[in-house]
Amino acid sequence: MFVASAATRLVLRLKLPVAWAAFYFLRLCERLLPPSVLSLLLWPPAAAWDLLHLRQRMPLTCWRRFPASWRHKRWRFLRRQGLGLYHSQFFCIWPDRLCGRRWLDRCRLEGAGNLIAAREGDPGVVLASLHFGPYELLPYWLRAYGIVTTSVRVKPPDSLKSLTDYQCSLSPPADAPVFLYAEDLIPLPRFSHVRKILGPGRRLLVMVDVAQGIQVDVPFEDRIFRMSTGAIRLATMANAELIPCLIAEISTWKFAIRFGAPVPRQYLGNVPDMRAIGAHLLKEFSQVVSRYPEQCKMRLARAMRPLAESGAKRSAVSHTVTVSESV
């Protein structure tokens, strides 16, 4: 037991130095190698990491949770879940380089007119998203395009905090944080705080498939989707637009970011119509997810459950919510 404990302490002690060394080595490789060669060299370690965590992801269980419109080409789903999830996350290592033409050509914006139209009078925008595709890259790509975005996420491990903070500081602009931590938004922030986050030209990115905070059950096809209401409540508090936004990897290291139609203003108000908002968001999300269901992450799958009995239907219609203390 003593030997095992000593080994664990040694691993934890070496974790940060090894991570820093790998970080700088990969940044050097990014500068020296063409993207195609770099992608090829990074594929084996990324695939090995994916396989190591395959059992934890429970891909077949996730597959069965999806509605019928998302379940096609199961072999492609299993292949992606087993070999292709981690490969794109290397882009987080060089966020300061994404605004260069070399990388910017690998990511296109779709439906950006929805975002531009929302800027009239700059009412602020909350981007609602899912744990889908390389969502970790979404704030970095948006900032590379000059769309200053801050994403809400959970705090990283303390052992890697210094590296994570430095990595985030590389993404311009330096005066706008890449991430806000959900733990710091407990309880829901005051109006003045929200307006500071959603200052002129800035966007807040919030996931709606997290199992935290106040949630609402939204019927979707033959399923119930458990939706967190944090993004809705933040948009309502700040009188901001609420726009669905997803990123997908359309081919190896090539991405598309799609902005859906904004939630109609009549759904947002002092008492927002949660069911109508949820239905609108899911309709927009499904246009992307149904094309690339293999890129769904486990958190998204867990938000789905079968609409099996009338009791579940009654719960959805009456908007039963689960209350906790986080956004």
Image (cartoon, rainbow, N blue to C red):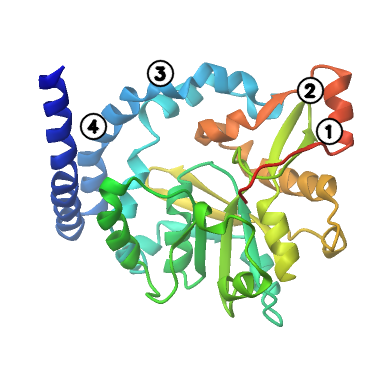
- Mark in the foreground, 4 or 3: 3
Q: Which residue reaches farthest bottom? A: 121
Answer with mark 1 or mark 2, whichever residue precedes in sequence.
2
Of mark 1 and mark 4, the one earlier in the sequence is 4
- Residue 5, compared with residue 108, is above or below; it is above
Label 3 secondary element: helix
Q: Secondary structure at mark 4?
A: helix
Please say whether residue 17 is visible from this viewpoint. yes
Residue 201 image position (x, y, % from top left): 57, 77
Q: CA distance from mark 2 to mark 3?
A: 26 Å
Which mark's residue is nearer the viewer, 4 or 2? Answer: 2
The residue pinned by badge 4 equals 44
Q: Which residue is mark 3?
A: 55
Indicate which label's residue lies in the foreground, 1 or 2. Answer: 1
- Which amino acid lies under the numbered mark 2 shown in the image of this protein? Leu
Mark 1, other Cα within 10 Å: few <14 / some 14–19 / many ≥20:
many
Q: Earlier in the sequence, mark 4 or mark 3?
A: 4
Q: Is 304 on the left or on the right of 36, as rendered?
A: right
Judge depth for marks 1 and 4 and give the one in front.
1
Q: Amino acid at mark 3?
A: Arg
Q: Amino acid at mark 4?
A: Pro
Residue at the image position 82 percent from the left and 36 percent from the top = 320
Work out how far the residue at label 1 is from the one at label 3, CA to CA, in angstroms.
32 Å
Q: Which mark is residue 316?
A: 1
Q: CA distance from mark 4 to mark 3?
A: 18 Å
* Marks 2 and 3 in Cβ contact (< 8 Å): no
Question: Quick one: label 4 or label 2, which is nearer the N terminus?
Answer: 4
Q: Report, in whole angstroms, how far the alpha carbon at label 1 lies from the one at label 4.
A: 44 Å
- Residue 288: where, in percent of width, then height? 62, 43
Point 62% across, 59% down: residue: 127
| Residue picked out by circle 2 | 307
